[in-house]
Amino acid sequence: MSKLVIEGEHRLNGAVHIHGAKNSALPILAATFLAGESCEIENCPLLSDVHAAIKILEHLGCRVERDGHTVCINASQAQGYEVPDTLMREMRSSIVFLGAIAAKSGKAHLTFPGGCELGPRPIDLHLAALRQLGLHIDEEGGRLLCRVHDRLVGCPISLSFPSVGATENILLAAVTARGTTTIFNAAREPEIVDLCNFLTACGARIRGAGEGTIVIEGVDRLHGCRHRVIPDRIETATYMGAAAITGGSLLLKDIYPEHVQALIPVFEETGCQVTAWRDELLVNAPGRLRRIRTVRTLPYPGFPTDAQALIMALTCVAEGTSVFIETIFESRYKHVCELMRMGANIKVEGRVAVVEGVSTLSGTAVECTDLRGGAALVLAGLAAGGTTEITQLHHLERGYEAMAQTLAGVGAHILYDGADV
Ligand code: UD1
């Protein structure tokens, strides 16, 4: 079984390049299915989830070529409409293909993406919105059998919650629908803006990306384009955390500081000094972190749920008591048990977690419970006394490219699978 072995208590120092955003790359890859010509997607991270999205595109009949971080997709001959259950399960966000497949192929046969490590992950908002656009959806024994009569038709859609995935599915279905679609209470995440920029470069007509109301005027067809995926703000947060928890100093390069604005005051509250330039950010950490009064996860531009576990790792060794309120996902504290194995003092009651900082964590054997929970264990391992062994790495591989090599490059004592990195 592959594992990461970390010898903690080494201060990190140096510069880290941040990769393209997984959560942008996935919907953009799904969107390339809509374009009638080739698309070239640059800065695509090398991750298992991206690989799964490419497999779905190939299964649908696209020609896909990959050269390092650039992926070329030609969907001009692709007429597929079915995604097998094995591929749907490989990547939880595979549901974002639904809007694109239905719009292009006129029908779509998918299976439910299923529950996940963050608790139940319903898609009711996706399905209700697509039905409003005229998609007929039969739900049969875990399968979604969808068909379009003639063409999808634009309409006003109000989301009861600004769901990222639902907003993406509506965008993909609406860009080539007949007439105008207005999304009220749309998600405002930078990944939504990136998807809209990609679609616009392909000829779509979209206004209001990044705002609560997005207006899409349907066009007959999309053409190809070249697009560069935005930097990953959660990978950025992770390495900010690595600097903070080791009392270190890391310069994060090729990022958009404005995408981590909600995190900067939180790091400053712990005593870190954060300096931002145009596309770089420097984090200088104090000897001992201070507690954070309250972290409440919220839709963008609020504090991201994907950074909750990361910041919790810091508070485990901070001076004082910190409180977390998880408002986005029902069950996003699975990493707590693993952090407690390392000596953390955490109490969870429903959506609230209270962390009493301890002076030191101790290395031991722990398991990744999910992607960001796994990254939190890596952070904890970097600070812990002794050796931390982390297994169930497939979670980490979904979202972090070359994490062990990157950390080793800035001074971490970390081995992958027992071999020096
Ligand atoms: C995306 C991100 C994920 C991030 C999340 C919130 C990707 C691949 N994943 O996930 O990393 O943590 O946004 O920022 O981009 N909900 C419903 N019904 C629906 C859809 C969502 O009840 O039809 C609920 C979910 O259960 C959850 C909340 O809405 O409680 C947020 O979900 P959503 O914004 O849709 O997140 P994802 O798109 O799944």
Image (tube, rainbow, N blue to C red):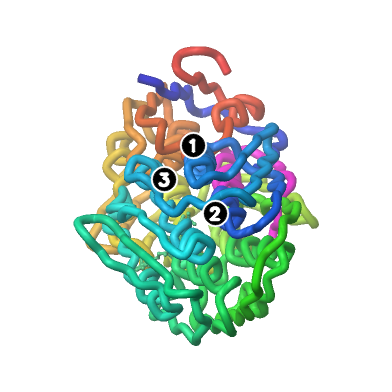
- Residue that mark 1 sits on: 48
> What percent of the width, then of the height, locates residue 35?
64, 58
The image shows residue 33, relative to residue 286, as above or below, that is: below
- Residue that mark 3 sits on: 91
Task: Report the span colored magenta.
Answer: 234-257
Mark 3: few, some, or many residues within 10 Å (few <14, many ≥20)?
some
> What percent of the width, then of the height, locates residue 146?
36, 65
The image shows residue 394, relative to residue 228, as above or below, that is: above
Question: Where's ligand 1: which quadrant?
Answer: bottom left
Name the amino acid type tagged 2: Ala
- Front position among marks 2 and 1: 2
Describe residue 273's horizontal placement relative to residue 150 as left or right.
Answer: right
**Number of disc labels:** 3
Q: For the point 43% across and 74% down, which residue is it? A: 149
User: Is residue 244 something that shows in the picture?
Assistant: no
Determine the secondary structure under disc 2.
helix
